[in-house]
Image (cartoon, rainbow, N blue to C red):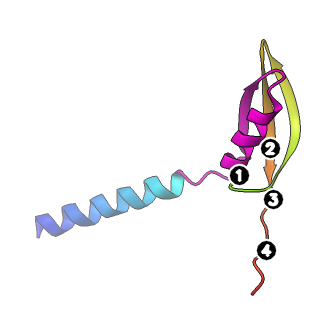
Amino acid sequence: MLNSLHISITCYILLMMVLAGCSKKEPEVFFRRGERDVLKMKSIQACHGDFRVMEETDFGPFIRAKLKCIKRELRG
């Protein structure tokens, strides 16, 4: 009885951790000034494909780019 309760609580905690990790916040990437190819590579990885740069902010020798990921519709 106690063992099944422990398993249930563990499963509930894991589920809550997974759901909490699914952030709706748009991603941002940092890259060194002048290295636009690094921006493109990191953005594709962060968005799993297409993206749009919404804002860039200077951080010393680095730039922070806020991205908007573009979801493609699958056609079948």
**Pointer 3 with pointer 1, Cβ within 8 A:** yes
Apparent side of residue 22 relative to residue 18 in the rendered image (left or right) = right
The reply to whether dot 2 and dot 1 touch (C-beta < 8 Å) is yes
N-terminal label among 2 and 1:
1
Residue displayed at 70% across by 40% down = 42
> Is residue 34 on the magenta stretch?
yes
As drawn, 43 above or below 70: above
Which span is picked out in magenta?
21-47
Secondary structure at badge 2 equals strand
Q: As drawn, is 41 to the left or to the right of 16? A: right
SS label for mark 1: helix
Which residue is label 4 attached to? 73
Q: Residue at x 73, y 56 (%)?
A: 49
The numbered mark, 2 or 4, whose residue comes first in the sequence reads 2
For residue 70, which numbered disc appears in the image?
3
Q: Secondary structure at mark 3?
A: loop
Label 2 vs label 4: CA separation? 19 Å
Residue 44 location (% of width, % of height): 72, 48
